[in-house]
Image (tube, coloured by chain):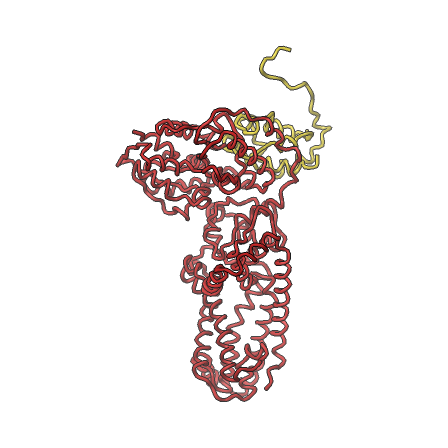
Chain colours: A red, B yellow
Amino acid sequence: MTFFTKFCIPFIVGATVMFTVLAIKYIAWLRNLPKSDWRLIAKNFFSLRTVTALWEVVSESLLHRRIFKVNPALGYMHMSLAFGWFLLIAVGWAETVAYLGMRWVPLQGHVFFKYFAALNNISAHNPTFDFVMDLLLLFVLSGVGMAWLKRVRSRILGMRKTTKHVAFDRIALSALWFVFPMRFIAESVTAALYGGGGFLTSGMGAILNKIASNDVLHHIYEPAWWLYSLALGVFFVAMPFSRYMHIFTEIPLIFLRHYQLRPEAMEKSYDNFEVEACSRCGICIDPCQLQSQLGINDVQSVYFLRDRRYNMLQQKIANNCLMCGRCEQICPVGINLNTLRLNSRSSMRNIPHEGRYNYLRDIDKSSGEGKVGYFAGCMTLLTPNTMSSMHNIFQAAGEDVWWADRDGGVCCGRPLMLSGEMDSAQKMIDYNKALFTKHQIKSLVTSCPICLKVFREQYNINDIEVLHHSEYILRLIQQGRLKVGHTKDATFTYHDPCELGRGCGIYDEPRAVIKAVGELLEPAHTGKNAFCCGSSVANTAISDAQQLSIAVKVAAELEDTGAQTIVTACPLCKKAISRGAQRKVVDLSEIVAQSIK
Amino acid sequence: MINFGFSINRARTIDLDRNNLRKSNEIIGEMPELQACIGCGSCTASCTAGNLTEFNFRKVHTLVRRGEYQGAYEEMNKCMLCGKCRLVCPRGINTRGIVMLIKRKLGDF
């Protein structure tokens, strides 16, 4: 039995190139993993994590469940292409086994089975396999049809904007679009000439027999298979250099992620898996307020990852991001977009000056003590109402407070971190840590979610409990140490600060506090989907007018709830939203302080 | 000397014809909004680092714009990037962007 003819060459060459490049890339990335990452892999390999990872591979790489959550039609499109193609390969393999028994058949023998079946005069047809294979082909073709539709009118599939692609992507994309239609035509012609095929290909074959003579069909028979093989070959060659690298890369990524590997403040080899697992689906574009509000079209995570992957990342692109986390929250591949952007910024930062922050050595003139340390944070020092409200709350609760930075303190370090200057931030962290230890505080309360995040994630102060003031106030109310009056006709709406909500996962506490003093009305985008106020310290690229434009939009949505007062729990959000709002914008602590009984 | 609680700068001249304004022009070219500065000093008054040291953002960027780069990079490195200056700036200048730009441009001075 022969399993080779000339038209197989493009396919064989393509598959060889693809698997060689994949092997080279993965081996290089794995070899460059730091020792600590290898230890994690070794530790977690023989554990339940491998099983859960395997399940995630099925549910995400094949079924794409997370995309279904974004939009069912979009999910179906991705699933039909991925799962459909996988099943075509798997069932196709079973089909050859059913026809030929367990024997070795070269790869092209499986892929072009219908051709070789005719060539080798296998005349007995298996109607079950013919039907199933045609059904699967229809499944995939429906996905291809939706992909075409998405290019013309993306809104039908729930996407306001789709990705603008680079040349390699366009080549691979065009080839992929032709793979399945060409397969359909080639198999239909085969069915027309030699019989067989399920409802789809034999049906099309019958039509072909009607409209074209046998002579014509014989002439287009070989070219049809050639075109199918060429489409496959071109796709395979372009694949490791294009967005379709994600098809395979997502699998090792899922395993490594389950083994607890994560990107860090500095770039490392693991990042390659995350960067190349991006499929450039463009789901991250729509939530980006820099796009929807400001019309900036080249900075979104999809473009950032693309530029980083092809070594053409510009600083102005890396810097132009609010790091609000709205894209990271929705990313169907679960890429740590913020961390990757941070370590890119870190690689691009200016060379730090050796003697910088030496002045921190002898500035500590702090005094006083208390069980609870209150770190207002730089931004809170600019919102004195929050400070005085916290003062009243502490007094009403009879708390023993040590004020860490009332007369000016040192920044928590997060703004420097967000600019990629982790080494500089470390000096602030060391200073503040020493300060907290010196005053022997048991818990640390802060009004600033920016500070809160860095305290929790970078400070390693495990013996000090770090609380946001929303958590702290709620605790005081629940313990009965703080009595607040509930006013029925006082209506509030709440803006989730990015660093508090998506950053630290604190959504319920501020809401519980608001409900204790009045009525809470939720805006259209809330909780995990809340907007960014636009003034994020992570962005050093947009102008004041652009910040204001975002704030106006956010404020308008909050005012649409009809609430009398806009409440937030971040001094920066308060400052930003007040600029765009007609109604009063206050911090959570203010409404509590006003209703103390 | 009697301590009056303040000091004044030594008298000196800045000769714009003799200073090399190439870096200054590059900085202003990249962020022209810096020219909107009215020199009110709100940035310096609210500055976290300025509260602890002699660091004076208004002074540094004013000197840099006039081609006086000596020591500007070292001074700018005292900034903690906390962003209070940006919030208080009445001209809405992206001060944090300016700090990073000056550090980037004058790193080798």
Q: Is residue A547 visible?
A: no
Task: List the single residue furthest toward the top.
Answer: B2
Instruction: Name the image quarter holding residue B48.
Output: top right
Specify whether A145 is left or right of A9. left
Residue A242: x and y in percent read 58, 61
Instruction: Name the image quarter holding residue A65.
Output: bottom left
Instruction: Name the image quarter holding residue A158.
Output: bottom left
Q: Residue shown at 41%/58% (left/top)?
A: A69
Q: In the picture, which quadrant includes the N terminus of chain A?
A: bottom right
Q: Residue shown at 38%/46% (left/top)?
A: A526
Residue A571: x and y in percent read 44, 34
Q: Is residue A532 above or below residue A359?
A: below
Between A190 and B15, the one lying in front of the other is A190
Between A576 and B93, the one lying in front of the other is A576
Between B77 and A581, the one lying in front of the other is B77
Q: In the picture, which quadrant includes the C terminus of chain A?
A: top left
Q: Is residue A375 above or below residue A168?
A: above
Between A190 and A220, the one lying in front of the other is A190
Q: Is residue A428 visible?
A: yes
Residue A17: x and y in percent read 64, 68
Task: List the single residue furthest toward the right.
Answer: B18
